[in-house]
Image: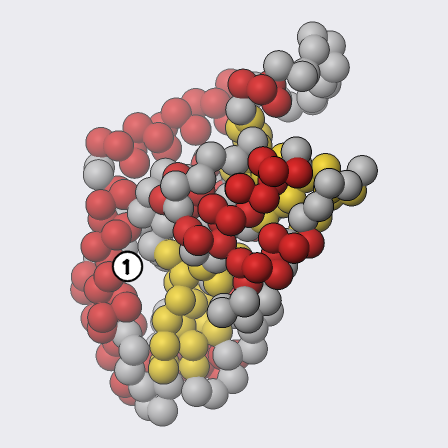
Amino acid sequence: MSACCATRPARTTHSTSAVSYTHLATAAVIVEPVQGVGGAYDLGAPFLQALRERCDAVGALLICDEVQCGMGRSGESFVSKRYGVQPDMLTSAKSLGNGFPCAALLMSPRVAAAIKLDALGTTFGGGPMACAAIEAVIEAIESEHLLERVREISSLLRERCIVGPVIAHQGEGLLLGLRTARPARQIQAALLERDILAGTSADPTIVRLLPPYVLKSEHVELLRAALLDIGS
Ligand SMILES: Cc1ncc(COP(=O)(O)O)c(C=O)c1O
């Protein structure tokens, strides 16, 4: 048995090459539907759907790592849902507790049925603080209509912030990659000088943005002004 970690090759060929790596000896495919640290690479619905079909064909499990891209960050509860794919297992953390350290592993009834009583032990699992934090996060996302807000602010960022050193964008929702004409680290430092925190990634020309879901349009304008000030 083996597990396959699908890395994302060039945008045009990713579906076919990832699918061809998945064969009868593959136990599971673990995939991050939007690759965060990789550079906010959105794998897209056709890629994930092709993997789902291939996993079903060869009897492999599809596991989505949504630690960074899930829990509303894409503007949908989970990216796999946005892409119309149901994974067998899904990992969640980070936004799950909005800063409180916690994580969750979601699984299909078929996978869950394989876990017998006493098969799993966990020191902190089901801790009341973590569970209360998760409940509060879900409540806030729903009552403050944060998924809609993520989608709106994401569109605004894409529309307003392809200026100065930024030449393109990628990602989903508020896990965005701004492709820069100069090294991303230079742009990150220049943004920090203007009081704007941004991240970098494994891709040296991607500035990675993971702002809070409550970001407002005036913050987008501040970023635009900073990018224009930095210049190309
Ligand atoms: C996509 C992804 N998966 C897993 C992890 C690891 O999560 P944790 O630090 O909660 O173990 C990270 C951490 O950055 C991540 O970005």
**Hey, which residue is sitting farthest front in the picture?**
57
Amino acid of disc 1: Ser
Protein image colouring: secondary structure
Q: Residue at x 69, y 8 (%)?
A: 117
Q: Residue at x 47, y 46 (%)?
A: 49
Residue 124 visible somewhere in the drawing = yes
Count the numbered circles shown.
1
Tell me if 142 is positioned left or right of 8 in this view: left
Foreground residue, 159 or 189? Answer: 159
Tell me where residue 27 appears, x and y as whole percent.
72, 37
**Hey, which residue is sitting farthest right in the picture?**
1
Q: Residue at x 69, y 21 (%)?
A: 122
Foreground residue, 214 or 154? Answer: 154
Distance from mark 1 CB to nearest ligand 1 atom below 8 Å:
no
Tell me if 62 is positioned left or right of 86 in this view: right
Tell me where residue 142 appears, x and y as whole percent.
26, 32
Tell me where residue 111 appears, x and y as whole percent.
61, 22
Asked which quadrant contains residue 201, the reply is: bottom right
User: Which quarter of the image is occupied by the C terminus?
Assistant: bottom left
Residue 220 visible somewhere in the drawing = no
Above or below: residue 142 compared with residue 75: above
**Hey, which residue is sitting farthest top in the picture?**
117
Circle 1 Cα neighbour tier, 10 Å, few/some/many (<14 / 14–19 / ≥20): many
User: Which quarter of the image is occupied by the N terminus?
Assistant: top right
Q: Which residue is mark 1?
A: 154
* Local secondary structure at mark 1: helix
Foreground residue, 220 or 118? Answer: 118
Tell me where residue 227 appears, x and y as whole percent.
32, 81
Above or below: residue 149 compared with residue 134: below
Above or below: residue 85 compared with residue 190: above
**Hey, which residue is sitting farthest left in the picture?**
218
Q: Residue at x 70, y 11 (%)?
A: 116
